[in-house]
Amino acid sequence: MNAVLEVPPPAREACFAIEARGVTAAYAGATRLKGVDVTFPRNRVSAILGPSGCGKSTLLRTLNRTLELVPGAHVQAGAVLFDGLDIYGPGVSASWVRTHVGMVQQKPTPFQMSILDNVLFGARYHGLQRDPVEHAREYLERVGLWTEVKDRLKSSALSLSGGQQQRLCMARTLAVRPSVVLMDEPCSALDPRSTSVIEGLVKELAADYTIVIVTHNIAQALRVAHEAVFMVDGEVIDTGSRDEVLGDPRHPVVRDFVTGVVG
């Protein structure tokens, strides 16, 4: 039997959509995460922050098993729970995990195919049961892109602007119907106007999805996040509400980062 079908239904009564317990991970011959314990509340935007190389993106990739796509990378210890289910446990396939925990990459990554086919790519793989255009329309509308592309759905996705491409990638992720959406610095390659649009979408999407966003931008985290996780050298050194962690930093390292003493 397909491993995906063997996975029990998630325990959705859990208050945390996803959590890491004692996660240690390594790649390129070095330990990147060191016993990380962190929780991500359901239907909230959680921002992961910290200096470059601190393990932010590595942590994000452990949450949907995309870290194992990096040659030589692996989780050495600990567990990642999705609605109470250990996603690294026996009988749990990576494909099943990535269906329920989606990812939006740092740079827009449209495929060399039409706008319509981009939106439907993952949904078709997982067994699209609806009219293709109506399915695509639902998620293009969700990211505010439908009116801009409805008359050129068969056009190449590469003809879109950078901001439009990133919204298309968001629609493609949502079309698979995950409950958690991971975002790895989704605005870093965008202009200020497109960044504002994406940030607005992030806040709106939290009504129906759990959002975990990696960002190096303190101001962005203050604008969009409900919760904040601060990392240094592969460890979580502070976590809590956005205002607790970033508004009035309790940890001296976080305070120095927020005030610009270090960066």
Image: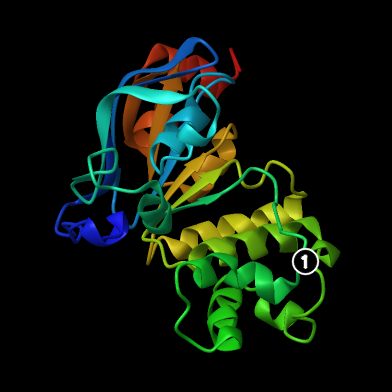
Using residue 116 as the reference point, say whether residue 204 is left or right of it.
Answer: left
Q: Quadrant of residue 160?
A: bottom right
Quarter of the picture containing the C terminus is top right
Does 161 appear above or below 19?
below
Residue at (22, 51) in percent of width and height: 83
Does 213 appear above or below 73?
below
Residue 132 visible in the shown view = yes
Q: Position of residue 245 (x, y in %)?
A: 38, 30
* Colouring used for the render: rainbow
Q: Quadrant of residue 133?
A: bottom right
Residue matched to label 1: 157
Q: Residue type at mark 1?
A: Ala
Q: Viewer-proximal residue, 263 or 233? A: 233
Residue at (46, 37) in percent of width and height: 61
Residue at (49, 10) in percent of width and height: 30
Q: Quadrant of residue 35?
A: top left
Q: Position of residue 120 (x, y in %)?
A: 59, 72
Does 201 appear above or below 105?
below
Residue at (82, 62) in percent of width and height: 158
Q: Viewer-proximal residue, 126 or 187? A: 126
Residue lying at the far right in this picture: please name it. 159
Q: Position of residue 243 (x, y in %)?
A: 38, 37
